[in-house]
Image (tube, helix red, strand yellow):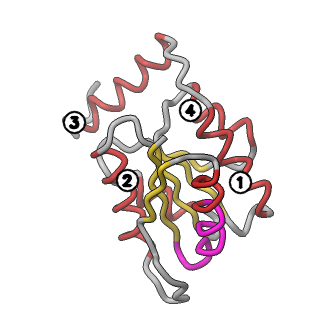
Amino acid sequence: MRIFIASDHAGYELKEAARDHLRQAGHEVTDCGPTSYDPLDDYPSFCLSCGEAVVAHPGSLGIVIGGSGNGEQMAANLVDGVRCALVWNEDTATLARQHNDANVVSVGARMHEREEALALIDAFIATPFSGDERHARRIAQMAAYERGRCGSV
């Protein structure tokens, strides 16, 4: 699986661990930054790059990591075509994929121990979209709004 990953300074250590973990599992991982720890970094550019890469490579997935994961999720979701879900347990990680066909996951590094965070990422990656008509219909409604930005679906 092709995976793009990004973080802020608070998520940098977990990003490094997740990148290595995923590569060891056989995934093709591209690090969208940061490339070094900087307590004053600005995460939006890294998360936007991650989201853009996911959209440019259909079938790929993305991971954004921050202290809480909230800002990173917000930044990634600014990219048309990204459906980024903030996850906090394995149920939310699997449901993000099964029901929402999320293509980017956001994890809060300060909210989880390393092994728990890696388990959330693994659950997200391992879960396919169910393809159920009701879920596909709802995703299509959001995509139509995104394309038109007109408010009616």
Query: How much space separates mark 1 and mark 4, taking CA atoms?
Result: 16 Å
What segment is highlighted magenta in the picture? Answer: 8-18
Q: Is residue 118 magenta?
A: no
Q: Is residue 113 above or below residue 139?
A: below
Where residue 147 is drawn, which disc sits there?
3
Query: How much space separates mark 3 and mark 4, taking CA atoms?
Result: 22 Å
Amino acid residing under circle 4: Arg
Badge 1: how crowded within 10 Å, few (<14), some, or many (20+)? Answer: many
Q: Nearer the viewer, mark 1 or mark 2?
A: 1
Q: Nearer the viewer, mark 3 or mark 1?
A: 1
Give the quadrant of residue 15: bottom right
Q: Secondary structure at mark 2?
A: helix
- Expressed as whole percent of the image width and height from the top left, the position of residue 83 reads 44, 41
Q: Residue at (46%, 78%) from the top-left corner? A: 35
Give the left or right position of residue 120, taking residue 74 as reference: right
Where residue 15 is drawn, which disc sits there?
none
Q: Nearer the viewer, mark 3 or mark 2?
A: 2
N-terminal-most mark, 3 or 1:
1
N-terminal-most mark, 3 or 4:
4
Residue at the disc numbered 4 = 97
Badge 2: how crowded within 10 Å, few (<14), some, or many (20+)? Answer: many
